[in-house]
Image (cartoon, grey):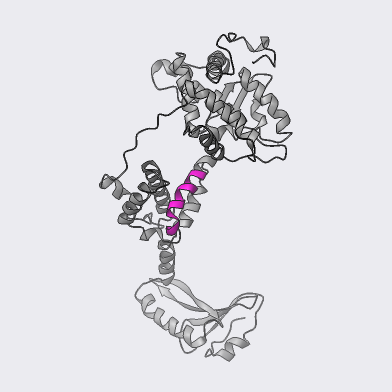
Amino acid sequence: MKSTAVKLTKSVVESLEPRNKQYTQRDTSLTGFGVRVSPKGTKSFVYENRVNGRFKRVTIGRFPALTVDQARKMASKLVGDMVQGIDPNSQKQEAKRRGLPLKQAVDEYLERGLKEDTKKDVVRAMKHLSDWMDKPITEITPAMTVQRHKKISKGAKSSGARANLVMRYLRAILNFASKRHATAEGVPLLVSNPVQRLSAEKAWNRVKRRRTFIQPHQMQQWYQAVTEGLIGMRFELEYRDCLLLSMMTGVRPGEAISLRWSGVDLAAGVLTFPDTKNHSDHRLPITRFIRELLTGRQSLSGAHEFVFSNQGGQRPKEVRGAMERIEELTGLHVMPTDLRRTFITAAERLDIGPYTLKAMLNHAIGDDVTAGYLVITVDRLREPMQRIEDALLRDAGVLPTNVLPFEPLGSQRLGEMV
């Protein structure tokens, strides 16, 4: 039933009863002004008019938070704008779009299906910008990025590399948000990315590529700290076994710690790490030491999904805490990626071929003609990986220098590793 227009007053609005469907009670003193009543009884002041020939309804506010007189005055201001072709709703949407806070931009970036390790790294990096989280990204200026980059670079608990990483993540987040929140016509939210100023001023820190690894003469000290020095930590056994597996296989610690029993085939002697950093499954042979380690973990992790979980089903999310404890005990500043670099260095000492090494590390073989025809199977990796493992264990003092040569999988007996 259509409502007859009346002069809206407080008493009139209060008397309006809800109906089965939403309806509008129009005002006689200002054409287009009215109050919409929902089936639940919510009353909202509106103003209706045409903008460039198209019908538009603007919601002004709710009653009784807004009085009738206040709402009518606000509606009167809209008359001139809409007659001139200005759409208040579009203005509201544009204001909301331009008010997108950095925190929301970060959250949306993290929802892109990134790897868990990458997500954690982004979150850590954004802590350096915690005071910007409520700031609209349109208000982040080039000068601000340069100044913050300098501040992070000089921080006591930071470095030039960390400052670069923070700004690279910020650049990626802003690029993503700018495109995602473009107008319907495709106009991006940001005219330009403020982080570009660092390139224009050549302000990026020059960081030497990290080349550290555990030297052969340091291996025994490191191995002892891993096997004996983590006692008392919540995940002491999980940390120990994860670090050892990472060292002996060259697998990134972040990927090793997510290994599932579904990826362990002891009968075939194969480990499978699904959807790794380069978005492909990585399959490796199970060597003698790793076989002993995994056999031990079957009782330590119970029937739970992850190899490096405890009997209660809990598991560590990263190995940083263990690495810090090892550094305290040994004085060796070893980063998680240094374990992978140590594996690579051991392979080089043994003159392992470059194609074989790339296959072990799950790197692209290359785009030369020969590499295009090359297929390296898991079994082809078994012998060189056993040689690398033996070399590392000799450095650690676990194996004697006259260790038995590699034998095919079928001839090995569990328990004869050492």
Observer-nearest of 239 and 114? 239
Please identify the residue farthest to the left as the structure is shown.
201
Q: Quadrant of the C terminus?
A: top right
In reply to whether residue 363 is colored magenta, the answer given is no
Q: Which residues are magenta?
A: 120-132
Residue 200 point in image, percent of width and height: 26, 47
Vertical placement of 261 versus 405: above or below? below
Q: Quadrant of residue 407?
A: top right
In reply to whether residue 125 is colored magenta, the answer given is yes
User: What kind of secondary structure does the magenta stretch mostly adopt?
Assistant: helix
Instruction: Identify the residue at horizontal 54%, vertical 23% (top origin).
Output: 220
Q: Quadrant of the N terminus?
A: bottom right
Instruction: Identify the residue at horizontal 45%, vertical 86% (top origin).
Output: 30
Vertical placement of 149 versus 348: above or below? below
- The answer to whether residue 198 is seen in the rendering is yes
Residue 82 point in image, percent of width and height: 39, 75
Observer-nearest of 6 and 113? 113
Residue 14 point in image, percent of width and height: 61, 87
Observer-nearest of 417 and 182? 417
